[in-house]
Image (cartoon, coloured by chain):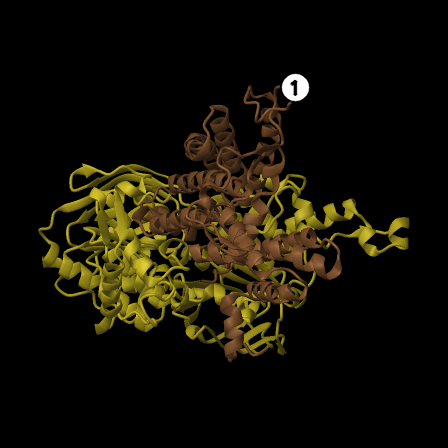
């Protein structure tokens, strides 16, 4: 590309933090006319946040704005809303569709930008009463579809469309905007079949030739190589690599994505191997399916050894979260789960809990906590209900009275043990910070004295210090109480530091289970191998 | 306003609740004004206390459903109807005196259990819209019973229309049955001041039982279900069963509540009378500082005293002062205004 020309888009020193949690650090990115760049990175690497900043999303402003500069054609811009960004020629296709199901393709493409005809009524009252110029709408929508080089039925209702066509409709809507200069595609191929994806890729090439710059986010790395001019890799909120696509290949990109410099501190835990070499299987899962929206599990067969920490990793939406949620009966599931030689019925939370399972949900505020109740209640409640702990029995067990003193004692014990920052044990769970809430969730599970503990995304949204504490607490609980732990996390590095073995889920299936000492590239490749 | 540095007074208002404060101040004002407008203060105070004793149990009936997350029980008339069935059947079967009260309770209990189960089953199917559906359940059950009171084959000459010899009258006197059975029990009388010890003790016993229940394992589960049903489910609680239990408890308490009300009031009121019984109870507990998802026994007691205080004091004081009956207007403004206010703020309750 001609470097001497002013770049179409220049992002300089972009920084962003959410309540002190640094998610983007010093991002510099340039984009020229007609250039296609591929933006890749693990979940949580900051890709979406960066794109939201560029698109002027409200959420960025509400959380305190960002630092750094965005320049378009050499002019500094500051978007206050997505409308400003659209006016400046930026179009974005989101992962989630924003289409009206009961409208046709054409109507969706030109929604609120329809060519109109004046009429007597609109002359008298207002322009809002103009009639639609259907003929011109058809033409303009056809032109936008033509730009993509695919066939779309313009009269079809969105609700009748296959998912791929919906995606194309979204893109056509962006293309129909006259001033479009930069198009952001956030995982557009995630829902497409291979053939549709190919059509989309050629559409991207076509757009580039017409001078539109494209930022293409995807997890399918070969797509990046086939369509992009440059590849930008993000990791932990930093832009780690920016190279020409022709100079790199899939394994190398994978390594950039997941492979932090494999230094001493990120070594998998020592001695893991021999510790569990002879352990017998405690839980075996066969042909599990779980209907969890956005995290569908298709066919998982898995064995967990007694006393180990098994990690389950994978990209978002591939089904790793569905596994514990399904086994614990929180979402509709099928298949067979055997625990210590006995079958555990699915879809019955109580049965799992009676079999001494415990679950720390990834949805801390939704499932994990009684936000409006005290820490005492939060920590003691499941143990009280399931195992009749912290209760005093009167009248031959007819009346089971809450034992406030025992509840306070156990709560205080975990507050000290896990260093939960709170005013006292009666403080409401809502008032704690995310990290401390997570510790309360752990304490709640620990109080059950489970023999098998599922932990889902234990470090999501908490700061580095709390993260270390939480992971250490899990390890300690595993070692001292001989509790088998199944830990689900999107962060591979965290799994490698904590677990004995790691299973990778992709496309709702297990694509491989390896010892945690296996290289990050292996896991990275597994994560991407079956992506749907 | 600077929210970071609130003065002690602002903090007090925050914790006590501004509406509660205004109503308390208004009630105190009325009490102070009493002697000046020529009303007898001891009579007024004993009025407040006895009206509190009549209504306490009906307000207490709100508590279980609030705890289980079913919201305020606007379907209170359903429980009241169970109580009315118990009352009329007890009289029909010829029980008199204090026994008729006990029998009324016993007979209304199975009705409350059956109707409460059906009502709870319905509320479990419309999670999120409980309060609206509850209102219609209450209203429609009242309308249905309007027909039933006429049709059911009651025979007791004390209850049926004199000329036709069938169909229940709109008001039935409890003279000779359980009029004042609780109120007269151990009643304390000093001049113009009467204290209905029996009724208060009866309410206290039920309130204590409710307080105790909320401290048991099941009661704890009920509160947790109301606080976060998903959390409760993840802890192995059968959420629907707990909700059903709360609705049945609430319906039964409403049935007992109306019987206590009748023994104080001296009459059984049928037909449209239960129609508006839910609103005063709902607003009383809200004035007491409860919210749609949190309520304590203290809320019940304070709320009933405040609400009934306003209702009893305004007619006397206002009438003597401006020679115009404003009591109904003020009662409606207070009760509906309070409900409106409480439903717009779903925050934590005051204690």
Q: Is residue A478 left or right of residue A22?
A: left
Residue A396 in view (yes/no): yes
**Residue B347: horizontal and vertical position, in percent?**
50, 60
Shade representing chain A: yellow
- Which residue occupies 15% across, 61% down? A479
Shade representing chain B: brown
Q: Quadrant of residue A375?
A: bottom left
A80 over B220 or under it: above or below: below
Residue A206 in view (yes/no): no
- Which residue occupies 75% across, 57% down? B323
- Which residue occupies 29% across, 47% down? A510
Q: Residues within 10 Å of mark 1 (few under 14, many from 20)?
A: few
Disc 1 secondary structure class: loop
User: Which residue carries the number 1 mark?
Assistant: B164
Q: Quadrant of residue A271?
A: bottom left
- The residue closer to the viewer here, A155 or B11, is B11
- Which residue occupies 16% across, 46% down? A282
Q: Is residue B301 left or right of residue A500?
A: right
Q: Is residue B172 left or right of residue B219?
A: right
- The residue closer to the viewer here, B95 or A316, is B95
**Residue B278: horizontal and vertical position, in percent?**
56, 44
Image mark 1: chain: B
Q: Tally the numbered discs.
A: 1
A356 over B290 or under it: above or below: above
Quarter of the figure with the N terminus of chain A: bottom right
- The residue closer to the viewer here, B296 or A288, is B296
**Residue A434: horizontal and vertical position, in percent?**
38, 66
B64 over A38 or under it: above or below: above
**Residue B261: horizontal and vertical position, in percent?**
52, 42
Q: Is residue A129 left or right of residue B105?
A: right
């Amino acid at each position: 590309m001609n470097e001497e020309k002013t770049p179409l888009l220049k992002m300089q020193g972009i920084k962003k933090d959410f309540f002190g949690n640094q998610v983007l650090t010093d991002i510099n990115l340039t984009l020229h006319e007609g250039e296609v760049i591929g933006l890749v990175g693990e979940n949580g690497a900051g890709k979406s946040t960066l794109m939201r900043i560029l698109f002027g999303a409200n959420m960025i402003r509400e959380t305190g704005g960002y630092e750094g500069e965005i320049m378009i054609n050499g002019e500094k811009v500051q978007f206050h809303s997505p409308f400003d960004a659209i006016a400046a020629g930026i179009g974005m296709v989101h992962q989630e569709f924003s289409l009206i199901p009961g409208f046709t393709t054409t109507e969706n493409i030109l929604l609120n930008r329809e060519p109109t005809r004046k009429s007597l009524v609109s002359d008298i009252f207002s322009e809002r009463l103009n009639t639609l110029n259907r003929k011109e709408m058809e033409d303009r929508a056809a032109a936008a579809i033509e730009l993509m080089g695919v066939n779309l039925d313009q009269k079809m209702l969105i609700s009748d469309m296959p998912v791929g066509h919906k995606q194309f409709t979204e893109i056509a809507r962006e293309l129909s905007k006259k001033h479009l200069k930069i198009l952001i595609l956030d995982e557009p191929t995630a829902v497409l079949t291979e053939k549709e994806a190919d059509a989309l890729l050629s559409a991207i090439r076509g757009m580039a030739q017409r001078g539109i710059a494209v930022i293409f986010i995807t997890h399918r790395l070969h797509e990046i190589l086939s369509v992009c001019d440059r590849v930008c890799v993000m990791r932990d909120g930093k832009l780690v690599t920016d190279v020409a696509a022709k100079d790199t290949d899939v394994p190398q990109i994978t390594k950039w994505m997941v492979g932090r410099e494999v230094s001493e501190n990120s070594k998998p835990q020592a001695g893991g191997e021999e510790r569990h070499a002879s352990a017998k299987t405690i839980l075996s899962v066969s042909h599990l399916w779980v209907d969890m929206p956005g995290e569908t599990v298709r066919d998982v067969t898995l064995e967990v050894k007694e006393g180990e920490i098994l990690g389950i990793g994978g990209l978002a939406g591939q089904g790793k979260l569905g596994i514990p949620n399904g086994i614990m009966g929180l979402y509709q599931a099928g298949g067979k789960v055997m625990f210590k030689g006995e079958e555990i019925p699915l879809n019955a939370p109580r049965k799992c809990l009676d079999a001494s399972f415990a679950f720390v949900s990834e949805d801390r505020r939704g499932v994990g906590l009684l936000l409006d109740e005290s820490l005492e209640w939060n920590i003691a409640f499941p143990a009280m209900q399931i195992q009749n702990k912290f209760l005093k029995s009167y009248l031959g067990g007819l009346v089971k009275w809450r034992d406030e003193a025992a509840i306070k004692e156990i709560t205080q014990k975990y507050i000290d043990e896990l260093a939960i920052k709170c005013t006292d044990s009666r403080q409401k769970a809502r008032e704690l910070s995310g990290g401390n809430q997570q510790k309360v969730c752990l304490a709640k599970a620990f109080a059950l004295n489970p023999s098998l503990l599922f932990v889902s995304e234990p470090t999501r949204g908490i700061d580095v210090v709390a993260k270390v504490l939480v992971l250490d607490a899990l390890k300690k609980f595993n070692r001292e109480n001989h509790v088998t732990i199944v830990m689900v996390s999107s962060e591979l590095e965290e799994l490698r530091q904590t677990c004995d073995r790691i299973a990778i889920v992709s496309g709702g299936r297990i694509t491989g289970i390896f010892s945690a000492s296996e290289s990050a590239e292996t896991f990275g490749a597994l994560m991407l191998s079956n992506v749907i | 306003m600077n929210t970071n540095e609130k003065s002690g007074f602002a903090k007090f208002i925050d914790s006590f609740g501004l509406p509660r404060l205004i109503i308390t101040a208004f009630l105190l004002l009325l009490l102070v004004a009493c002697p000046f407008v020529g009303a007898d203060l001891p009579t007024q105070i004993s009025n407040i206390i006895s009206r509190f004793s009549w209504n306490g149990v009906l307000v207490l009936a709100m508590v279980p459903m609030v705890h289980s997350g079913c919201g305020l029980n606007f379907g209170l008339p359903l429980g009241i109807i169970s109580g009315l069935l118990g009352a009329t059947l007890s009289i029909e079967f010829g029980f008199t005196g204090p026994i008729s009260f006990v029998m009324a309770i016993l007979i209304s209990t199975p009705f409350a259990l059956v109707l409460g189960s059906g009502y709870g089953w319905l509320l479990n199917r419309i999670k999120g819209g409980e309060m609206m559906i509850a209102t219609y359940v209450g209203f429609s059950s009242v309308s249905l019973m309007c027909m039933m009171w006429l049709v059911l084959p009651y025979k007791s000459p004390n209850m049926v229309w004199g000329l036709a010899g069938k169909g229940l009258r709109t008001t039935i006197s409890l003279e000779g049955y359980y009029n004042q059975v609780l109120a007269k029990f151990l009643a304390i009388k000093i001049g113009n001041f009467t204290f209905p010890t029996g009724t208060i003790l009866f309410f206290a016993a039920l309130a204590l039982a409710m307080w105790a229940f909320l401290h048991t394992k099941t009661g704890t589960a009920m509160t947790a279900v109301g606080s976060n049903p998903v959390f409760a489910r993840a802890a192995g609680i059968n959420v629907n069963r707990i909700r059903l239990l709360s609705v049945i408890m609430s319906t039964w308490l409403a049935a007992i509540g109306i019987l206590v009300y009748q023994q104080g009031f001296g009459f059984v009121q049928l037909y449209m009378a239960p129609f508006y019984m839910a609103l005063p109870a709902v607003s009383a507990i809200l004035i007491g500082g409860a919210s749609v998802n949190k309520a304590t026994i203290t809320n019940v007691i304070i709320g009933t005293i405040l609400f009934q205080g306003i209702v009893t004091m305004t007619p006397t004081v206002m009438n003597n002062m401006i020679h115009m009956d404003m009591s109904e207007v003020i009662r409606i403004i207070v009760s509906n205004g309070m409900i409106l206010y409480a439903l717009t703020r779903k925050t934590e309750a005051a204690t």
